[in-house]
């Protein structure tokens, strides 16, 4: 007699994972910079910006969202979405961040080693603004944990659907970034909204615990 558990398992339908895409191309000719933010703790806005690119689902393709987030306040200070993965999109997000945050003395810009962030035009703008450049070194998501967390919140809570067309996605991205900045409280900033935290300075209480993994020597932030 066939095993009942085996028969039941054959009837189960596995949920198909939504197809993703790669947004980072780190094999290129441009200079790669060291990670200079290890153990760095922001004490005010505009000391450290973290950057990343994520993808948004369309019916038969993807759109690509470039984000710049302030590490102290968790506020998205710059964003830009496009249909391709050129350097133009992160550059536009950076220009937006610079336009709305003029006081950037001592600022560090941290990103992965993707070609969009290493290319001449992007690096030149950072250097022209006297912004220090920091990049991940080992491809470990924890090296850019805040940017990864912001991506997860946007895609998991605000941009999880497949948008019917590019124009709809553009509108929803703008709404999502505004909602994230002005309406969503964060445990990492004492349950403040990012726009509120961006007006403060000094240490902000965190409402999550850090769990240490001795074997891997990594600190994981649980929010």
Image: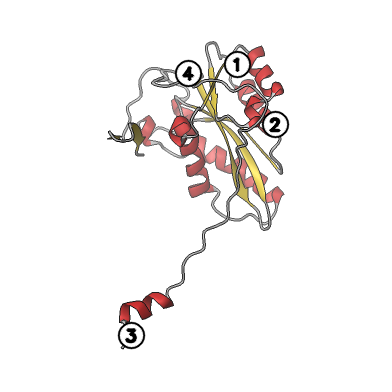
Give the crowd class for mark 1: few <14, some 14-19, many >=20 residues within 10 Å.
Answer: few
Q: Which mark is residue 195?
A: none
Q: Secondary structure at mark 3?
A: loop
- State how far apart marks 1 and 4 are (Cα): 23 Å
**Dot 1 or dot 4, earlier in sequence:** 4
- Residue 215 lies, in percent from the top left, at 29, 35
Q: Which residue is mark 3?
A: 2
N-term-proximal mark, 1 vs 2: 2
For residue 28, which quarter of the picture?
top right
Looking at the image, tell me whether mark 2 or mark 4 is earlier in sequence order.
4
Residue 179 x, y percent position in the rendering: 52, 40
Q: Is residue 9 above or below residue 93?
A: below
Q: CA distance from mark 4 to mark 3?
A: 61 Å
4 relative to 62 in the view: left or right:
left
Earlier-in-chain disc, 3 versus 1? 3
What separation in Å lies between label 2 and label 4 (alpha carbons)? 23 Å
The residue that label 1 is drawn on is 102
Write the residue at 53% across / 18% down.
108
In this figure, which residue is indicated by the disc labeled 2?
Answer: 87
Callout 4 secondary element: loop
Which structural element holds mark 1?
loop
**Which numbered disc covers residue 36?**
4
Q: Nearer the viewer, mark 1 or mark 4?
A: 4
**Labels 1, 2: front one:** 2
How far apart in space, not on screen, are marks 3 and 1 (Cα)?
Answer: 71 Å
């Amino acid at each position: 007699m066939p095993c009942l558990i085996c028969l039941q398992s054959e009837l189960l339908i596995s949920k198909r994972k939504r197809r993703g895409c790669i947004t980072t191309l780190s094999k290129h000719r441009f200079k790669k910079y060291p990670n200079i933010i290890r153990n760095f703790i922001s004490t005010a806005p505009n000391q450290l910006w973290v950057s990343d690119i994520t993808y948004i689902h369309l019916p038969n393709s993807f759109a690509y969202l470039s984000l710049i987030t302030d590490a102290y306040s968790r506020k998205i200070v710059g964003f830009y979405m496009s249909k391709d993965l050129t350097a133009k999109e992160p550059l536009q997000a950076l220009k937006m961040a610079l336009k709305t945050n003029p006081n950037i003395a001592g600022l560090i810009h941290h990103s992965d080693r993707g070609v969009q962030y290493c290319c001449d035009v992007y690096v030149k703008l950072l250097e022209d603004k006297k912004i220090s450049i920091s990049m991940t070194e080992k491809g470990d998501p924890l090296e850019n944990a805040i940017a990864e967390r912001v991506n997860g919140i946007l895609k998991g809570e605000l941009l999880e659907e497949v948008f019917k067309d590019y124009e709809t996605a553009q509108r929803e991205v703008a709404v999502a970034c505004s909602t994230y900045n002005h309406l969503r409280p964060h445990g990492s900033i004492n349950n403040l909204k990012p726009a509120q935290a961006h007006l403060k300075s000094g240490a902000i209480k965190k409402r999550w615990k850090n769990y240490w993994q001795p074997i891997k020597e990594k600190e994981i932030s649980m929010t």
